[in-house]
Amino acid sequence: MATVYLGRDLNRYRTVRRVVEAVYARLDWARYHHIVVKPNLVSTTKVLADTHPDALRAVLDVVRDVTDAPITVAEGTATQNTWVAFRRLGYEEIVNRYKGVRLFDLNTDEGIPLQAFDRHLRPMRLRAARTVLDADLVISVGPPKTHDFVIVTLSIKNTIMGTLISRFAPEPPPEHIIQGAGDARPLPVRVLRIARRAYDMLPPRVQALPILETPRFAFMAREVRSDKMRMHQSYSVLHLNLFMMARQGLMPHISVIDGWEAMEGDGPTDGTRVDWRLAAASTDALAADALVADLMGYPVHEVGYLYYCHLTGLGEGDVRRIQVQGNLDPGAVRRRFRPHRLIANQRRWWDARVMDIVRSFVTNVHEPIMYPRA
């Protein structure tokens, strides 16, 4: 039976450290020689969307208490410069306090091709950073958030999307970006940002129209410089591709979900704060994500990529079979997170053709296939 540690303490640092210590006490640390800590840095300006520095400190403190193995704090942002995110969040100052810890931009790494699908369900390849694939131990640490494409984002999606390669931003960044004196991002990124602002100004009922949805996916699906964008072929294929990445080695070995402050509404960047005051951790990434998603009001069978991982045995997705330990009762912290305004569109992830592909990876189904609510 999978175990998820769910806890709360006086502040964020102590809350995260409490659940991390519970997980780490069960591991044989002599086995690990290359450790990657994967934060979630989706924005260089909106701290609520990112892994808080105190959560990162809590993870690094506990790891350094039990091993001297090299640690790489690794991230690859989507369209902005990873080093801008590192510096604005104070990550450089944090890692400098530890021996054998470094920061690394995964977007500059060697890309290893992994199997995925395009919107016509034809095979294609996406590049993933070798540093993560080669690690003995990958630790995901980040906040729970609602999402604009896949309903919720937790530890599995954090690991996958940050590991896929994007060649948009230079590394290291020009110094004037750090100082806020200008914008040196490539022209396509600036155009994308302007288009996103214009799109966000439209009423939700207009945003949901297929006439806008189709070109939105088509633009991302054709962006050859960013495999993070190429993941976005359609709602249904995005869930399939997340599952495909997970089964090819992009599942974190340890999930740390920092819910001291979570995000609801128009996540993963523009949502509103939820003062949830909890953290969860597990060596079963799917169990951690499944439990927290369920506590947010989104059971596994409503979130395509989590459901596919559950069906194919990539972890425990049935919350009835997850043992919850710690000082919090799940029922006491359960609450319905307000979804993204385009939730009705996102729930169209179900596709019989995609399910046929997923079924090909199922060797023994112990339960009937469930369907998302309309």
Image (tube, rainbow, N blue to C red):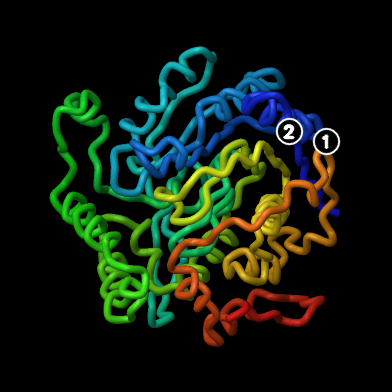
Q: Is residue 154 visible?
A: yes
What quarter of the picture does the N terminus occupy? bottom right
Q: Quadrant of residue 169?
A: top left
First in residue order: circle 1 vs circle 2:
2
| Residue 369: image location, x then y, percent | 71, 81
**Vertical side of 147 occupied by 274: above or below:** above
The residue tagged 2 is: 8
Q: In front: 209, or 258?
A: 209
Circles 1 and 2 in contact, beta carbons < 8 Å: yes
**Image point 40% across, 64% down: which residue?**
231
User: What numbered label is drawn on residue 327?
Assistant: 1
Q: Mark 1 Cα within 10 Å, few/some/many (few <14, many 20+)?
A: some
Q: Is residue 140 visible?
A: no
Secondary structure beneath dot 2 equals: loop
Looking at the image, residue 62 sits to the left or right of residue 94; the answer is: right
Quarter containing the C terminus: bottom right
Q: For the point 45% across and 75% down, which residue is it? A: 345
